[in-house]
Amino acid sequence: RFLMHGLRVLYTDMDVFLTANPLLWDDAEKDVQAQAHLVADEVSSGIILAKPTEPVILTFRAIILWIHRRMDWIEIMDDHQVVLDYALRQQSNIRLPGSQPGKPYP
């Protein structure tokens, strides 16, 4: 909702402790920035800065709709990160509910 009102959104997990202003690292060229504490195969959702651009709004709408329709929160233990990772990178993720190893989710 904040994105749809033209506001930047800074999302952090509850276990993230900020010791500086994360907006100081805002890159004007990027619509979405995610934390990176190491090079990994999966996007981390611990800290995300999203800008109110049409592609970002459409991506987050698609994520919310997909989660609402397809995820069993109890079965996968509330792991929204695999859905975010797939949405941002468009790469197959074998932990994504319903996916097959080596095949992207339809």
Image: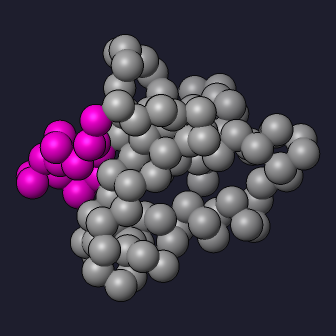
Residue located at (37% from left, 15% from top): 38
- Residue 9 picture location, percent across and down: 37, 62
Quadrant of the rendered image containing residue 75: top right
Residue 10 vs residue 77, the one in the foreground = 10
Residue depicted at 76% across the width and 44% down the height = 78
| Residue 53 shows up from this direction | yes
Q: Which residues are magenta?
A: 20-33
Q: Residue at x 36, y 84 (%)?
A: 5
Position of residue 34 measured from the top left corner of the image (x, y, whole percent): 36, 40
In the rendering, at what x and y percent does residue 13 appear?
56, 41
Q: Residue furthest left?
A: 29
Q: Is residue 68 above or below residue 93?
A: below
Q: Tally the numbered discs.
A: 0
Left or right for 33, reference 41: left
Residue 76 versus residue 56 in the image, above or below: above
- The location of residue 50, given as percent across then percent down, is 33, 58
Query: Residue 43 is drawn in which quadrant?
Result: top left
> Residue at 23% across / 48% down in the picture?
23
User: Is-magenta flag for residue 31?
Assistant: yes
Q: Is residue 98 above or below residue 16?
A: below
The answer to whether any part of residue 90 appears in the image is no
Q: Is residue 101 above or below residue 40?
A: below
Q: Is residue 105 left or right of residue 99?
A: left
Asked which quadrant contains residue 74, the reply is: top right
Question: Does the segment drawn in magenta span residue 71?
Answer: no
